[in-house]
Each structure stands twice: as C-alpha cells, then as structure tokens.
C-alpha cells in the first residue's frame, strides 16, 4: 500500500484508541491518498458523512510527515457559528500531534488576536472577510504571517460558489498564494453538488493553468435505507403549530421556514400551544441565537424554528425530526436539511412537509418530484464579478501600500475573477479611487471618501446588509427588524412586534442610533423584513408543471395532500397541456403559461421588440402582455447576447457598484438574470392557444 494511502501513525493510533473508531467512513478512507498527494480536491458526502475529518486527517498527516512549521493550513467556512462548532474538535485532533489551532473572526477579541500574531497556530479557522482584513491590516506582517501556508480547506464550498463571497474567496486566495511564493493546495467540502468538476475547477483558479492535479472524491455507500418523507397540507401556520404540538411528542424537532417572519409566526403559535420552542434566524442577536441553539441541543421534548441559518451543519445535537414548513426553493437545500436527521445508529433520515396554502403545496410537490428523479442543481458562480475585481484592486493597494500598474495581473494570473479588470482599473484611476504616482498606484481620495470609514471595513465585506433597527429589552439585545415593521400602531405601542417568537411593545425609538427599546407583551404581534421576488430555476418550475399534469412525487402523501392536489389540478387544468405551453388569450391581454422561471422569462422579454417587452410583466410561471399577443411572436426569436432590462435601483444591491462605470454596473447585474437555456426551450415549445372566460 502506498504511504500516501495511510494516515500518519500517531493519528491512526488516536483515531482507534481515543475516538474508539473501528473504521473510517467511506469518504474519509477515499480522501487520504488524493489529499496526501497534494492534489486540489473536492470532497463530497451527505451531511454528517465526516467531511471535516476527511480533509483534516490527511492534511494533518502531511503536516507531521513533511514537517510543516508555522501557520500552514487555513480553514474557511461561510458562518462564524460553524467555525465555533469546529474549534473543539480540531483542538483535540491537533493536540494529539503537538500542534495547535486557533479561531479568528469578527467576534474574537484583541487579546486573542495578539496571541495569534505573536505565536501563529498551525491551523487558522476564519472567514474570507477576516482573512482579507488580516491581509490589509497594518497590525499584521502578512508577508511573514502567511509565508508558510500550504493548504486551504473551504467548508460548505457550494454556499461560497453560488455567491459573490465565493469570487471574493478565490481572489483573496490568489493574493495569498503569491505572498507564499508556492502553490496552495485547495480542498473544498460539500454535501450536495450537481456539477462537482466545474466547482472544483472554479476553486482551483490559477492552479488550473499551472497544471495542478485535481480530484473529485465522493463518499460511497449512500443511505442504508430510503429516507422517510411525507407531504401534508395543513392550510395555515396556526394549523401547522397545532399539528406539531400533537405529533412527535418527546422528540427533538427542527422546523425550517422560508422567511424570518414565518419563523416568528410559527414560533409564537407553538409557544401558544405550550410547546417548548426556540428560534434561530439571521436577524436575531448572536447571543439570542446561541442561547436558543444551546438550549435546544441540551433539551429533549422541544422544537427549534429556523431559516436557512441552521442548514449548513451547525451542531445542535442529536435530532429526531426535520419538519419543513412549505418548501425550500431547491433540491440541494432540501438535501442539506434532510441530512440533519438520521445521524444516530438505527435512526432514519426523515422529513415532514407541512404546506400552508395551494401555491406552497404545489411547490413542495414539484421539488420532491424533481428530487425523485435524482436531480441536484448545478452550482454556478455569479457571472461577471467585475465589482469584486474593483474591490480586489483597492484591497491590493491597501495590502501593499502601492502596486505597479503594469504588473497587477501577476497577483491573480490565470484567475477568472479578474476577467475584464483592465477597464475597471482605468475607471478607478480616472475617478481617483486609485491615485497614480509614475508607474505606481495607491489608495486615492475617492476611495477614502466612499470606503475609508472604520479602517476600510466596508471594503472587506462583499455583501450588503439591509438597514435594520436593533431591538433591546433592558440590557438584552433580542435582534433586529426592518423599519417597514414600524407602523404607526407599532410605534405608538398599540400593536406589538414579533421577534424571537415573542411579542414586544415598543417603548421608545432612537432613530439616529437605529435602536428600539421594548418590553414583552402577551398579545401576538407582526414583523416584516424587506424581500425581493425569488427567481426559481427552470427545472423547479417545470417540475410544478409536471405535477399539474398528473405527476406525483415519490414520497408519502397524506390524505389531505392528495385531496388538495386534486383540487389544484382541477383549478389550474386550463394552464397546462401535455404537448406544449398554454397561451391564454383575453379581450385586452394575453398570458403565456411558460413555466420557465423568472430568469428565463426575463431573458425572453429582452429579446422581444421594445414596445412588446415594455408592455409585459413576468414571474416564475407566466409572462403577461397587456394586448392580444400573436401566437407566432416567439417563432425564430434570437436570444443570443441579450440582457434583461434592469431598474437602476437594482444596482444598489451590488456591493462596490460605485467603483464601476454605470454601464458596467448595469450589465453586471443584468447578466445575473440571464437564462439562455430556459428561454431557448420556451421559444422552441409548441404554443396551444386557449380563450380566457
């Protein structure tokens, strides 16, 4: 057997004798040789498949056998809470070998940071934003601190790759690799991916052109038994709470909701039904979330209501049941949530869907039907990350003090994150975001004005947080809400807010400091957060159409779900046809039931003549025209190179858009609403005309 196919001796001893493991899991075995060989790897297994150990055990073996010294491994994750959960496990593993691990993110204090800088650990747990902050900080001698880095592990890599945080991560990694002067091995961990080879190639970045070996490693074995999945229709959030108060008594239940307001409403209703209930979502304070998650982990007969914050593997202890209120909007999200159950020996992965209305029942049925076909969404990084290119050029100026205009490409050579950055750089210089002194560029006055506050903190985060008001009871921070929740009745104390599953009466509001002081109340309140229409994938929406045409998901359906689906099919029978798409014509308007998803519909509209597109609106299922559309209008329509029309205010949601020319900022946003494949499929479909009554 090859030396690379085994763990280092001391680690093997502790795995067997300290952990008491008789054997490694499939992924953990399969990953040893490729990781130890130094190849860039993507490790894939179901949730709780042991991915952390699959990466860290062979990396630790390399560290010992190759005598790595200093900070040699960086472990990044999308959530600070996930890093906090990992720390005790990795502290144990590294201690076996006389090595150390440390944690660095926004909640880590100055004292601990000073200790890390004076005596670097072997492994650093951090976020991409904190890694960037270290690179640009004057307190960190980054050329010395990072010079020995040999490997980077990216946990939940699919969550990174699907957003601009992923582009930010790979861009920072390229700069880090140039500082080190050696190739950094890149290891991604994921539970659900429809296109693993593409994602690994994206993570590799410049390592691809350098000829670095790459391996996708999949944990074989799968589930011992089929998961137990049931779809039920309950008709309202209150009814869902009633059902949950009567089912699975004595068990620990995790309930996923699709919005923060829905989570709050369900938590309040559960408490009204005398169910021990905790809440976790992004607008609750860190202390409030930790309190809930800790109490739930230690409890027995209780429920925790959460949004996607608990989707990414944060440890909340053994779980008996996963309940989904309504439906997630992707198969991959469902698989993440399903994987939270069935971790104990003898238990089965399970999910109960409770649909609260016709639309969400149909969405759940469509998603489960799609899952039954074996489909998992491909993860596609957002196209045209030119705003990230702008951010990276400014960050490089902060990091190095100055850089040569003629050779900036060397920092990201071979990485697609900087495609088109020459034009971006010209704009940054022209608008004085960067100032020139001969061949050198450094931070200019416009960058100081736009991003210089709090030591350029705004420049280090690639996503925009909505403006929210902090809610406080006494000295306790409960969470935050959007200002749109503050109606006149709420402000005057005549109606309560709903937050953390409890009702609160507003006592005072400090608008300048964005602080609301409250006291608890027994009456049910309401709370809202800003939201935009959610584009759904072509496959998800077409799966709903399949259900309307008679396809049933391959899961258990309750009698209520069967009866309600039959009603929905009857109500919507005129909107679907087996051999094409329905064009529903009225006297003054026309509806095309295209079932292509919002992006495909927006792409199609962009290809139509301006006067036609201007009179149309689209959602995930339909395109509506305010005139009698000709049935042959889509015949031969070319969609090559079209970009959907974007409202100017949409650019506000693109971080660093101020550092881009208007036309580039607009085209960057527009490119993210393109679905050529879905639009082309729609244009090639047979159109069946029907008259609207």
Image: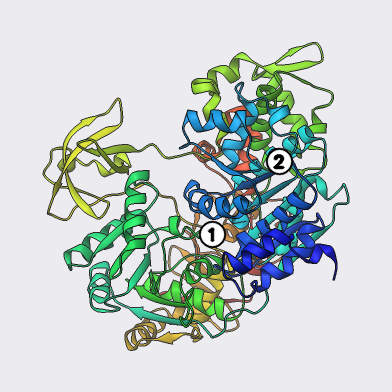
**Residue 347 % position (x, y):** 45, 81
Side of 201 relative to 457 (left or right): right
Element class at badge 2: helix
Of residues 587 and 520, the one nearer the viewer is 520
Check the picture and name the quadrant holding the C terminus: bottom left
Q: Nearer the viewer, mark 1 or mark 2?
A: 2
**Residue 352 % position (x, y):** 39, 77
Q: Residue at x 35, y 80 (%)?
A: 232
Q: Is residue 384 above or below residue 586?
A: above
Q: Is residue 391 above or below residue 644?
A: above
* Res. 501 in view: yes
Of residues 133 and 84, the one nearer the viewer is 84
* Res. 125 in view: no
**Residue 5 % position (x, y):** 79, 66
Side of 606 relative to 182 (left or right): left
Side of 203 relative to 368 (left or right): right
Of residues 35 and 255, the one nearer the viewer is 35
Residue at the disc numbered 2: 173
Residue at the disc numbered 1: 598
Q: Does label 1 or label 2 sit earlier along the sequence?
A: 2
Write down the quadrant of residue 70 in the picture.
top right
Crowding at dot 1, Cα within 10 Å, few <14 / some 14-19 / many 20+, comes out as many
Check the picture and name the quadrant holding the N terminus: bottom right
């Amino acid at each position: 057997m090859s030396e690379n196919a085994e763990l280092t001796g001391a680690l093997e001893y502790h795995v067997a004798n300290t952990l008491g493991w008789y054997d490694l899991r499939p992924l953990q075995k399969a990953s040893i040789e490729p990781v130890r060989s130094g190849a860039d790897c993507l490790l894939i297994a179901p949730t709780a498949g042991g991915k952390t150990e699959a990466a860290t055990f062979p990396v630790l073996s390399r560290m010992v056998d190759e005598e790595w010294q200093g900070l040699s491994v960086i472990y990044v994750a999308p959530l600070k809470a996930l890093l906090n959960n990992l720390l005790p496990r990795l502290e144990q593993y590294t201690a076996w070998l006389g090595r150390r691990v440390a944690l660095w993110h926004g909640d880590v204090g100055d004292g601990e940071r000073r200790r890390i800088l004076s005596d670097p650990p072997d492994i650093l747990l951090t976020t991409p934003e904190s890694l960037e902050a270290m690179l640009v900080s004057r307190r960190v001698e980054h050329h010395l601190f990072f010079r020995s880095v040999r490997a980077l592990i990216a946990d939940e890599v699919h969550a990174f790759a699907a957003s601009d945080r992923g582009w930010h991560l790979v861009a920072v990694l390229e700069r880090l690799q140039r500082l080190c002067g050696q190739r950094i091995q890149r290891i991604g961990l994921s539970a659900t991916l429809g296109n693993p080879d593409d994602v690994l190639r994206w993570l590799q970045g410049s390592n691809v052109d350098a000829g670095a070996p790459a391996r996708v490693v999949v944990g074989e074995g799968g589930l011992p038994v089929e998961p137990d999945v049931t779809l039920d229709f309950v008709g309202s959030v209150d009814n869902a709470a009633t059902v949950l108060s009567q089912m699975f008594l004595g068990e620990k239940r995790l309930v996923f909701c699709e919005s923060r307001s829905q989570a709050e409403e369900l938590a309040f209703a559960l408490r009204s039904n005398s169910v021990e209930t905790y809440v976790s979502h992004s607008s609750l304070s860190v202390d409030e979330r930790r309190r809930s998650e800790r109490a739930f982990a230690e409890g027995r007969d209780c429920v925790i209501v959460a949004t996607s914050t608990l989707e990414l593997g944060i440890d909340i202890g053994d779980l008996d049941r996963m309940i989904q209120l309504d439906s997630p909007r992707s198969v991959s999200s469902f698989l993440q949530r399903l994987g939270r159950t069935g971790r104990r020996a003898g238990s089965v992965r399970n999910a109960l869907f409770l649909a609260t209305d016709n639309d969400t029942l149909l969405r759940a049925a469509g998603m489960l039907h799609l899952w039954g076909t074996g489909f998992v969404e491909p993860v596609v990084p957002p196209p045209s990350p030119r705003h990230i290119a702008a951010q990276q050029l400014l960050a490089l100026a902060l990091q190095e003090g100055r850089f040569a205009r003629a050779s900036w490409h060397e920092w990201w050579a071979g990485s697609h994150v900087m495609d088109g950055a020459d034009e971006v750089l010209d704009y940054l210089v022209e608008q004085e975001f960067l100032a020139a002194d001969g061949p050198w560029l450094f931070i200019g006055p416009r960058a100081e004005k736009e991003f210089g506050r709090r030591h350029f903190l705004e420049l280090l985060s690639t996503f925009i947080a909505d403006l929210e008001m902090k809610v406080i009871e006494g000295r306790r921070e409960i969470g935050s809400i959007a200002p749109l929740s503050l109606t006149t009745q709420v402000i005057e104390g005549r109606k309560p807010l709903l937050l953390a599953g409890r009702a609160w009466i507003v006592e005072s509001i400090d608008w300048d400091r964005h602080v609301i002081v409250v006291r608890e109340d027994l009456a049910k309140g309401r709370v809202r957060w800003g939201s935009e229409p959610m584009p759904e994938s072509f496959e998800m929406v077409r799966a709903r159409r399949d259900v309307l045409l008679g396809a049933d998901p391959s899961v258990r359906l309750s009698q209520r779900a069967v009866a309600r689906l039959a009603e929905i099919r009857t109500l919507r029978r005129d909107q679907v046809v087996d051999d094409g798409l329905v064009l529903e014509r009225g006297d003054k308007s026309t509806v095309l039931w295209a079932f292509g998803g919002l992006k495909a519909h927006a792409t199609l509209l962009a290809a139509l003549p301006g006067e036609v597109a201007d009179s149309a609106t689209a959602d995930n299922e339909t395109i509506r025209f305010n005139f009698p559309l000709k049935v042959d209008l889509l015949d031969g329509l070319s969609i090559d190179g079209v970009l959907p029309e974007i409202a100017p205010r949409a650019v506000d949601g693109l971080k660093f858009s101020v550092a881009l020319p208007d036309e580039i900022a607009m085209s960057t946003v527009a490119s993210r609403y393109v679905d050529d494949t879905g639009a082309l499929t729609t244009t090639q479909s047979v159109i069946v005309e029907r008259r609207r009554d």
